[in-house]
């Protein structure tokens, strides 16, 4: 199999974004979580390799203000649902029409917004690390993340947000840019979940309640299957079971 291909493209507003391709077959677009990257969510733990070996082309985007993508600090580069627009631009750039779509945490929210609002039309959807509260009460989650950004220099090891603060630091995230990004994400109207009539896999760690109940979210989706894997919110994405479950589901649906 060919090595991972890293490439760059200009999004709808000219922001330069990075993305990765690996494998051959029906494309699966994977979107990472907040403060993370394609490398951290999908490549480092070999999720991409497992999926590619099952006969899929894995396409992984670095969101703006994350990974190797640009981190503009001008608020004009952060319109409402900018990440959905970036994902649509990636698909247009590659000329992809027939695809699966999935994401972890922030990537899951982005995927749901795109499909529920009929902006993207994938064959199937993978939602990891997300529950109802993370969709319908995003404003509360955003306040939590803004606190980590704003109080970054004052959060110590005894603070419950210490691990999130350290993760933000380790990923070298521009705090001004990512704070703008937090304001681009509206709450998901739960009634719009009825629009997601495609096969959907919902995955959540057995100790992950950060975004609420994944099982309750799956129950609201018309064609969803729920799977529980080991770990809390931060650790579940590092476990092999996540990649295994995505691979198995894609093999069945693809």
Image: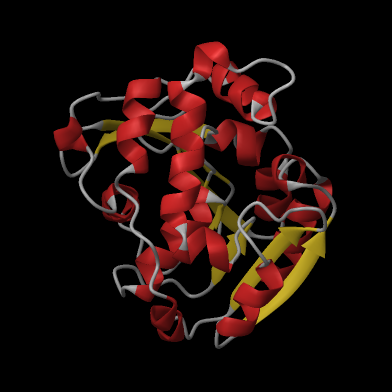
Residue lying furthest top: 153
Q: Identify which residue is drawn at 76% across, 41% down.
A: 235
Is 94 or 156 nearer to us in this picture? 156
* Quadrant in which the N terminus appears: top right
* Quadrant in which the C terminus appears: bottom right
Q: On the rendered structure, is 230 left or right of 198?
A: right
Tell me where residue 171 appears, x and y as whole percent: 55, 21
Tell me where residue 25 appears, x and y as whole percent: 55, 60
Q: Is residue 252 visible?
A: no
Query: Looking at the image, is 133 positioned above or below residue 20?
Result: below
Q: How is the image coloured?
A: secondary structure
Image quadrant in which you'd find residue 61:
top left
Is 219 or 84 nearer to us in this picture? 219
Is 80 or 160 nearer to us in this picture? 160
Question: How many numbered marks have been drawn onto this rendered protein structure?
Answer: 0
Query: Looking at the image, is 188 positioned above or below residue 168?
Result: below
Q: Is residue 241 visible?
A: yes
Tell me where residue 144 appears, x and y as whole percent: 51, 40
Q: Identify which residue is drawn at 36% across, 65% down.
A: 114
Q: On the rendered structure, is 241 left or right of 156?
A: right
Q: Identify which residue is drawn at 24% across, 23% down.
A: 73
Query: Looking at the image, is 176 positioned above or below residue 221?
Result: above
Q: Identify which residue is drawn at 62% across, 39% down.
A: 41
Q: On the rendered structure, is 229 left or right of 45?
A: right
Tell me where residue 236 appears, x and y as whole percent: 76, 47
Is 247 or 208 nearer to us in this picture? 208
Image quadrant in which you'd find residue 253:
bottom right
């Amino acid at each position: 199999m060919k090595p991972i291909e890293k490439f760059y493209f200009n999004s709808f507003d000219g922001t330069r974004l990075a993305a990765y391709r690996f494998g051959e077959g029906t494309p699966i677009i994977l979107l990472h979580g907040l403060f993370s990257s394609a490398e951290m969510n999908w490549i480092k733990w070999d999720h991409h390799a497992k999926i590619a070996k099952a006969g899929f082309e894995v396409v992984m985007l670095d969101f703006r203000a994350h990974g190797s993508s640009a981190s503009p600090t001008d608020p004009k580069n952060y319109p409402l649902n900018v990440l959905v627009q970036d994902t649509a631009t990636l698909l247009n750039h590659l000329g992809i029409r027939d695809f699966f779509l999935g994401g972890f945490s922030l990537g899951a929210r982005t995927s749901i917004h795109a499909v529920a609002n009929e902006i993207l039309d994938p064959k199937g959807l993978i939602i990891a690390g997300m529950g109802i509260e993370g969709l319908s009460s995003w404003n509360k989650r955003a306040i939590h993340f803004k606190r980590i950004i704003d109080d970054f220099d004052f959060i110590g090891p005894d603070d419950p947000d210490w691990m999130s603060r350290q993760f933000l630091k380790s990923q070298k995230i521009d705090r001004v840019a990512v704070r703008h990004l937090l304001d681009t994400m509206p709450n998901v109207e739960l009634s719009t979940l009825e629009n997601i009539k495609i096969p959907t896999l919902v995955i959540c760690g057995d100790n992950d309640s950060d975004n609420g109940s994944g099982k309750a979210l799956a129950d609201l989706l018309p064609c969803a299957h729920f799977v529980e894997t080991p770990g809390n919110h931060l650790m579940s994405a590092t476990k092999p079971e996540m990649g295994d479950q995505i691979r198995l589901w894609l093999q069945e649906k693809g």
